[in-house]
Image (spheres, grey):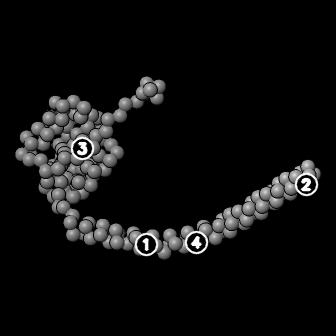
Amino acid sequence: LLNASLELVVLCYLLRRQQAEHRRKTMDWIHNVLNIVAPPFILLLLCLFLPLFRLPKLLISFLRSFFFTEDVTGKVVVITGAASGIGEQLAYEYARRRARLVLADIRGKTLTKVADTCREIGSPDTVTVTADVTDVNDCKRIVDSAISHFRRLDHLVSNAGIASVSRVEEYV
Protein backbone atom coordinates (compact mmCIF):
# COMPACT_ATOMS: atom_id res chain seq x y z
CA LEU A 1 0.00 0.00 0.00
CA LEU A 2 2.87 2.34 0.78
CA ASN A 3 4.54 1.57 -2.55
CA ALA A 4 1.27 2.15 -4.41
CA SER A 5 0.84 5.54 -2.68
CA LEU A 6 4.42 6.48 -3.44
CA GLU A 7 4.01 5.46 -7.09
CA LEU A 8 0.81 7.51 -7.29
CA VAL A 9 2.57 10.58 -5.87
CA VAL A 10 5.46 10.16 -8.30
CA LEU A 11 3.04 9.71 -11.21
CA CYS A 12 1.11 12.84 -10.19
CA TYR A 13 4.38 14.76 -9.90
CA LEU A 14 5.56 13.58 -13.31
CA LEU A 15 2.18 14.35 -14.87
CA ARG A 16 2.18 17.88 -13.42
CA ARG A 17 5.74 18.40 -14.55
CA GLN A 18 4.83 17.20 -18.04
CA GLN A 19 1.80 19.53 -18.10
CA ALA A 20 3.95 22.45 -16.94
CA GLU A 21 6.50 21.70 -19.66
CA HIS A 22 3.70 21.52 -22.23
CA ARG A 23 2.31 24.89 -21.01
CA ARG A 24 5.79 26.42 -21.19
CA LYS A 25 6.30 25.18 -24.75
CA THR A 26 2.85 26.45 -25.73
CA MET A 27 3.55 29.87 -24.22
CA ASP A 28 6.95 30.01 -25.94
CA TRP A 29 5.24 29.23 -29.24
CA ILE A 30 2.62 31.96 -28.63
CA HIS A 31 5.35 34.48 -27.74
CA ASN A 32 7.31 33.63 -30.87
CA VAL A 33 4.24 33.98 -33.08
CA LEU A 34 3.31 37.30 -31.47
CA ASN A 35 6.87 38.59 -31.81
CA ILE A 36 6.76 37.85 -35.52
CA VAL A 37 3.16 38.81 -36.32
CA ALA A 38 2.39 41.70 -33.97
CA PRO A 39 4.99 44.33 -35.00
CA PRO A 40 4.14 44.38 -38.73
CA PHE A 41 0.42 44.18 -37.92
CA ILE A 42 0.64 47.13 -35.52
CA LEU A 43 2.73 49.10 -38.01
CA LEU A 44 0.14 48.41 -40.70
CA LEU A 45 -2.67 49.56 -38.41
CA LEU A 46 -0.76 52.73 -37.55
CA CYS A 47 -0.19 53.47 -41.22
CA LEU A 48 -3.87 52.94 -41.99
CA PHE A 49 -5.61 54.58 -39.05
CA LEU A 50 -3.26 57.33 -37.85
CA PRO A 51 -3.81 59.48 -40.96
CA LEU A 52 -7.56 59.02 -40.57
CA PHE A 53 -7.38 60.43 -37.03
CA ARG A 54 -4.84 63.17 -37.82
CA LEU A 55 -6.36 64.40 -41.08
CA PRO A 56 -9.43 66.10 -39.54
CA LYS A 57 -7.28 67.80 -36.89
CA LEU A 58 -4.82 68.95 -39.54
CA LEU A 59 -7.65 70.27 -41.71
CA ILE A 60 -9.22 72.15 -38.79
CA SER A 61 -5.84 73.61 -37.85
CA PHE A 62 -5.26 74.77 -41.42
CA LEU A 63 -8.71 76.33 -41.69
CA ARG A 64 -8.30 78.13 -38.36
CA SER A 65 -4.92 79.51 -39.36
CA PHE A 66 -6.25 80.58 -42.75
CA PHE A 67 -9.55 82.16 -41.71
CA PHE A 68 -9.01 83.19 -38.09
CA THR A 69 -5.53 84.73 -38.11
CA GLU A 70 -5.53 87.95 -36.14
CA ASP A 71 -4.03 90.97 -37.86
CA VAL A 72 -1.59 92.46 -35.35
CA THR A 73 -0.36 95.22 -37.63
CA GLY A 74 0.01 98.34 -35.51
CA LYS A 75 -1.09 96.65 -32.30
CA VAL A 76 0.96 97.13 -29.14
CA VAL A 77 2.47 93.93 -27.77
CA VAL A 78 4.41 93.63 -24.50
CA ILE A 79 6.72 90.61 -24.32
CA THR A 80 8.55 89.76 -21.11
CA GLY A 81 11.65 87.59 -21.26
CA ALA A 82 12.33 88.85 -24.78
CA ALA A 83 16.14 88.82 -24.68
CA SER A 84 16.50 85.14 -25.59
CA GLY A 85 14.74 81.87 -26.29
CA ILE A 86 11.01 81.75 -26.88
CA GLY A 87 10.53 85.42 -26.00
CA GLU A 88 13.08 86.47 -28.60
CA GLN A 89 11.43 84.34 -31.30
CA LEU A 90 8.00 85.71 -30.35
CA ALA A 91 9.37 89.23 -30.70
CA TYR A 92 10.68 88.42 -34.19
CA GLU A 93 7.36 86.88 -35.22
CA TYR A 94 5.36 89.89 -33.99
CA ALA A 95 7.87 92.17 -35.75
CA ARG A 96 7.32 90.30 -39.03
CA ARG A 97 3.62 90.96 -38.58
CA ARG A 98 4.39 94.68 -38.09
CA ALA A 99 3.28 94.95 -34.47
CA ARG A 100 4.60 97.71 -32.23
CA LEU A 101 6.63 96.10 -29.47
CA VAL A 102 7.55 96.70 -25.86
CA LEU A 103 10.32 94.23 -25.03
CA ALA A 104 11.19 93.60 -21.40
CA ASP A 105 13.97 91.54 -19.88
CA ILE A 106 16.46 91.67 -17.06
CA ARG A 107 19.36 91.59 -19.58
CA GLY A 108 19.39 95.04 -21.15
CA LYS A 109 22.32 94.69 -23.58
CA THR A 110 20.93 91.55 -25.20
CA LEU A 111 17.49 93.14 -25.28
CA THR A 112 18.80 96.09 -27.29
CA LYS A 113 20.15 93.73 -29.96
CA VAL A 114 16.80 91.95 -30.17
CA ALA A 115 15.00 95.30 -30.49
CA ASP A 116 17.32 96.37 -33.32
CA THR A 117 16.65 93.11 -35.14
CA CYS A 118 12.89 93.60 -34.67
CA ARG A 119 13.12 97.06 -36.24
CA GLU A 120 15.02 95.59 -39.20
CA ILE A 121 12.46 92.81 -39.64
CA GLY A 122 9.51 95.18 -39.78
CA SER A 123 8.31 96.46 -36.41
CA PRO A 124 7.45 100.15 -36.88
CA ASP A 125 8.27 101.04 -33.27
CA THR A 126 10.06 99.08 -30.57
CA VAL A 127 10.64 100.08 -26.95
CA THR A 128 12.93 98.23 -24.55
CA VAL A 129 12.53 98.09 -20.79
CA THR A 130 15.17 96.53 -18.57
CA ALA A 131 13.12 95.02 -15.77
CA ASP A 132 12.92 92.11 -13.36
CA VAL A 133 9.48 90.47 -13.47
CA THR A 134 9.88 89.23 -9.90
CA ASP A 135 9.61 92.86 -8.75
CA VAL A 136 6.06 94.27 -8.76
CA ASN A 137 7.30 97.82 -9.34
CA ASP A 138 9.24 96.71 -12.43
CA CYS A 139 6.10 95.00 -13.77
CA LYS A 140 4.15 98.21 -13.31
CA ARG A 141 6.97 100.10 -15.02
CA ILE A 142 6.74 97.78 -18.05
CA VAL A 143 3.02 98.40 -18.47
CA ASP A 144 3.42 102.12 -17.78
CA SER A 145 6.11 102.32 -20.48
CA ALA A 146 3.73 100.78 -23.00
CA ILE A 147 0.87 103.07 -22.03
CA SER A 148 2.98 106.24 -21.94
CA HIS A 149 4.67 105.56 -25.28
CA PHE A 150 1.80 104.06 -27.28
CA ARG A 151 -1.26 105.17 -25.27
CA ARG A 152 -2.60 101.61 -25.24
CA LEU A 153 -1.78 97.94 -24.73
CA ASP A 154 -3.31 95.24 -26.94
CA HIS A 155 -1.40 92.05 -26.09
CA LEU A 156 0.69 90.94 -23.13
CA VAL A 157 2.95 87.90 -23.48
CA SER A 158 4.12 86.89 -20.03
CA ASN A 159 7.03 84.75 -21.12
CA ALA A 160 9.78 85.47 -18.60
CA GLY A 161 10.87 82.42 -16.67
CA ILE A 162 12.17 82.41 -13.16
CA ALA A 163 14.72 79.70 -12.43
CA SER A 164 16.92 79.13 -9.45
CA VAL A 165 20.12 77.15 -9.68
CA SER A 166 20.88 75.04 -6.64
CA ARG A 167 21.71 71.53 -5.62
CA VAL A 168 19.07 68.86 -5.15
CA GLU A 169 19.99 68.50 -1.48
CA GLU A 170 18.81 72.07 -0.85
CA TYR A 171 15.26 71.17 -1.94
CA VAL A 172 15.01 68.08 0.26
Q: Position of residue 119 (x, y in %)?
A: 22, 50
Q: Quadrant of the C terminus?
A: top left
Amino acid residing under circle 3:
Ser
Q: Pick out the residue farthest to the front.
A: 1
Q: Position of residue 140 (x, y in %)?
A: 14, 35
User: Which mark is drawn over residue 41?
Assistant: 4
Amino acid residing under circle 2:
Ala
Asked whether the viewer can see residue 142, the reply is: yes
Q: Secondary structure at mark 3?
A: loop
Residue at position x 18%, y 61% in the image: 70
Residue at position x 52%, y 72% in the image: 45
Lower sequence index among marks 2 and 3 = 2
Give the spatial CA distance, label 3 vs label 4.
Answer: 46 Å
User: Which mark is drawn over residue 51?
Assistant: 1
Q: Pick out the residue farthest to the top.
A: 170
Residue 48, above or below 98 = below
Residue at position x 85%, y 53% in the image: 9
Of badges 4 and 1, nearer the viewer stands 4
Reading the image, the residue beneath label 3 is: 158
Give the spatial CA distance, label 1 vs label 2.
Answer: 68 Å
The reply to whether discs 1 and 3 touch (Cβ–Cβ < 8 Å) is no
Lower sequence index among marks 3 and 4 = 4
